[in-house]
Structure formats: structure tokens, C-alpha cells
Image (cartoon, helix red, strand yellow):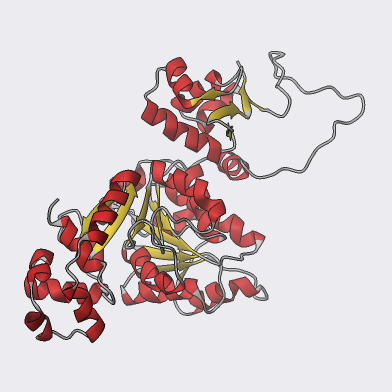
Amino acid sequence: MAELKYWLWLTSRRGMTPGKALMLLDHFVTPERVYYADREEYDLLPLNAGQRLGLEDKSLDIPQRILADCDRLGVDIMTFQDAAYPQRLRQLAQPPAVLYWKGKKFRFDEEAAIAVVGAREPSRYGEMAAEKFGLELAKGGALVVSGIARGLDACAIRGALKGGGPVVSLLAGGVDRITPKENRFLAQDVASVGALISEYPPGTEPKGEHYRPRNRILSGLCLGVLAVECLSFGGTMLTVNHALEQDRDIFAVPGAIDAPMSEGTNRLIQQGAKLVTCGRDILEEYWDRFPLKLAAAAPLPPQVAQARLESGREAPAQTQPPGEERKTAPSGQKTPPGRELIPRKEQRSRFTDDELQIIAALKERPLGADQVVERTQISARYVLSALTMLQVQGAVEELPGRRFQALVELEE
């Protein structure tokens, strides 16, 4: 732990790039030795004047602040020399020297990780496709990796959460600086069942120049990159270019020939990207390499997958035809106003046992998470995770005061 402050000192120096940091480590072996070196030793290395001045500043105030922020926020720090550092990143030309990690730890080298990327201003078709692929990939055992920007990043994440799988988001700022702000709750969901990862310390605001380095990590952690919808230039194509340089597989969703947002993906297909129309088209490329992970989950029945994709979307207001009473379940059980009644035969295909117990506990009135734990006797960790998934599926909503209310009714 004592050495960690020297890693943070090194990577927080003015003008320090991942490539220069690793060059210094090649020369000095450890960041502590870099710290205790003097000007004469720095003068022997290919550093510019700004980098030398940064290295001559021996203050540890910034590292100490970063460590305190990480402790407060529950953020872990992984360095290039850690045994758990992904081998996929080690192979890059300029791998990040330090990663900040909030959430679950993944052994990326053992994961069938797929990056899902696309436009920030997509069409409705693109939104549907990103969410569909996110769900199908996650349900099929893949680890979905994306950013957390508005548009297709967020759609892919929501789809993966609805598929019941974990998801990883790569950030262009600190893990506590989510952009756009409306996705901050989505980021909380990601951290609770997956992970938020950044090479920037907490408190770092996302900047335009951060996205290109972020994209190289995003593609570097994955086996392949799926481009859902994009122009022939922009951030998605930059990520694809990184993936090509890293010898990763490229997949693309086709679109109409006159659709501007499909121009980039159609061109990628012309240039050799694999045309895909469902998650299975991607998963089949990796079944032989990851037979246990990718064979663990059977595909969702089409009607169940559609129900999950539709959950949480705004439905048009419906008026009751004159003289027609509210429909009831076969047993005569009435659904409370605004709640969907889930028939017994569909309950286990849509929800886990824990989720069903929680929905039942919320039947009468909204409860806090601790009250749900008390009523169900499910551990707090699993209750919080299940509440997150139920919110994503549109079965539960959070009210002011951290209370939760069921939006569905279970047929008894």
C-alpha cells in the first residue's frame, strides 16, 4: 500500500502520459525509485521540460488526496504491475499505468467481453438494436462493455442489465463524475452489479481529449467491438480504429442505405466487419474459446426478451372503453390501478426467486431496503442488487426517501 502513493505521484505529474510513465518504469523498475531519482538522472531520459519539472516536484499532497477520495468513494486502484492487471491491456502499445475501479472485479482475460458502441444521437432503430444486443449478449454469457454517454452507450447498458448480466462502463473522467448527469443513476446500477473503470482519479472532469485514450482501453479490454449505428466519422469510428490496431474483431449492425446514422456501419460491413442481426451472431464466434461461460445461459424465449425490452419504456396513455370493467386474473384477483398483473406461468421466466419475494414484500405499501431485508430475510447485498434489476425491468420504482414501490402484481 505504501508504494501505491508513488504510483499516484508518477501518474499525476504534469504532462505525464501512459507511455512516458511506463518508459520511466522500464528504466527505474519501480515508481518509488522514479520518485527518489534526481534531476541528473531525469536528464538522461527522453523527457520534455514540462515532464522534468513535474518529476522534480516531490510533493505527495495529490496522491494523498486521491487515496482519501478512493477510500471515501469505495474505489479500488489497480497498477500495471499488479498480478490482476488484464493481459489484454498489457499488450497495447500504451497501456494505462493505473486504473481506478468501482464495483465488481473481473478477470477480463477469462471473459468473453464485447464492446458495444454507437452514436450519441441515434435513430429509434439504433436505440432498439443497441438494447436488443445488450440484452442478448448479457443473457448469452458475454460481458458487455460500453461507455455511459447518452445515446447508444446507455441503451446497450440498459439492455445488458435487463438481460441479467453484469456490465462494465469505461469513463473519460473520474468514476464520481458521470456525464451526462441524467445517467448518474444508471451509473449507480452499473457499479452495483458490474464496474465503473477509468484511468483518471476521482474528481477528474470528463474532457474532450480524454475520450480517445478512454476508447483505446474500452476496445483493449474486449475480444471484439460491435458498432450499432454511427456516421462514417466520429467517436465510434475512432474506437473501431483502435480495435483494428489491437487486432480485435469488428461487428456491425446493418441499416437502410439512405439512413445517415447507418452510413458508418454499412461501410464497415463493406470493409469486412461481420454483419450481425442478433447476439447469437457474435456469441458463436467465441463458443469454442469460452464453452462454460457462453453455454451457461439458455436463450430467452422471444416473448420474454420482448417483455424485458419493453419494460421501463413509457407507454401511451390508454382510456377504458365505456362500459368495460377492468380485466381480472382467472382467479378473480384484481390488479391495483396502474400495475401490470403477472400470471403465475410467466413469473419464473421473468424474475428470479429473490425478485419474486421482494415484489411480494412490496405488495401492500412502499418499503425501505432495510425493511425489505427484514421481511424477506434475504441478505442486504442481494436485496440491493435485486432492487436495481427490478427498477431496470420496470417492476419497481424508487420513491423519495429511498423507499421502493412495486409496479407489478403477482397472480396468486
Towards the viewer: 358 or 16: 16
The reply to whether residue 177 is in sight is yes
Q: Position of residue 389 (x, y in %)?
A: 49, 37
Asked where in the image residue 8 lies, by quadrant, the reply is: bottom left
Is residue 61 found left or right of 362 in the rendered image? left
Towards the viewer: 70 or 318: 70
Image quarter where the C terminus lies is: top right
Q: Position of residue 163 (x, y in %)?
A: 48, 43
Is residue 372 found left or right of 9 in the rendered image? right
Towards the viewer: 46 or 188: 46
The reply to whether residue 80 is in sight is no
Q: Position of residue 166 (x, y in %)?
A: 40, 45
Q: Position of residue 326 (x, y in %)?
A: 80, 23
Determine the residue positioned at 51% across, 46% down: 185
Towards the viewer: 41 or 192: 41
Determine the residue positioned at 40% across, 45% down: 191
Vertical comparison of 146 with 159: above or below? below
Determine the residue positioned at 92% across, 28% down: 322
Vertical comparison of 263 with 298: above or below? below
Is residue 5 found left or right of 336 in the rendered image? left
